[in-house]
Image (tube, rainbow, N blue to C red):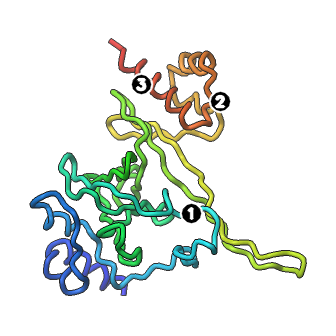
Amino acid sequence: MKKSVLIILLLFISNTTSIYAQYSNTIQINAAPGNMETMNRFYQLDEFIKRLDNGIDYSDVDSYNGTPYATPVFLLGNIYEKSTLLANNIALRYNAISDEIEVKESMTTSDDEAKPLTKSIDIYVKINEDIFIFAPYQGGIENGGYFLVLFEGEKYNFYKKLVKKFTPAKKATTSITTDTPAIFKDRPVYYIVTKDGKYYEFPSSKNKKLKVFGEKKEEVKKYVKENNLDLNNEKDLKKAIVYFDNLESSKL
């Protein structure tokens, strides 16, 4: 079954029009003029794969707490290939559990009709003001993932990996206890990234975070103290990274 699906996917990429018409209704999207054929090839054909994520129905929001998504609802956004706009004002949502960008024709289209965008380092999306890029940070596309861009500097970028800790639902074990719903809890991971693609993960400890700044550690530490920053706070960590990038960029 998996081999058959893989063959179909490969055929789909090389011959989008015929394969897509055979197995799925054509998706009409609000794309930039002339880009409809280009846009079609970035959808993965998944008519034969119905995923049951973590054994729960994501559409049944009363069955769990939190959300498996960056935002629980679809929002309007754009899809780009490098600097080229492929589609604008299209419904998008990031699924942190499957690490996929879900796409559907419009805000009124059923969520069941959403399809995952093909993962490519050349494709990124902008959902409202949030930019998601795909990066092979572990050595290859298959080990890559989506990152939320928090800052792009002269020498360093600041990325956020949206990680969700999933706790399954539990049935009550006694008459005096109650059922516990499944829980999705945010556990974001932050990275400082060099322009040549090296990723440095920030540890959870405030003091250990400073070590990531290398030989500029003491200068950043002084800046953090003078400005009363909390490096476990995302906005404050961003301020420290902006300062660090300015220090590095000012080198002769």
Between 146 and 200, the residue placed more toward the observer is: 146
Which residue occupies the extreme right position in the image?
Answer: 176
Residue at horizontal 39 percent and vertical 39 percent from the top: 198
Which residue occupies the extreme left position in the image?
Answer: 34
**Circles 3, 1 touching at the beta carbon (< 8 Å):** no
The answer to whether residue 135 is seen in the rendering is no
| Image mark for residue 147 | none
Residue at image mark 3: 245
Residue at horizontal 39 percent and vertical 82 percent from the top: 49
* Dot 1: element: loop
Sequence-wise first label, 3 or 2 = 2
* Dot 3: element: helix
Q: In this view, does 94 lie above or below 128?
A: below
Q: In this view, does 116 lie above or below 125?
A: below
Give the mark toward the camera: 2 or 1.
1
**In this picture, residue 48 sits left or right of residue 31:** right
Sequence-wise first label, 3 or 1 = 1
Q: In this view, does 43 lie above or below 215?
A: below
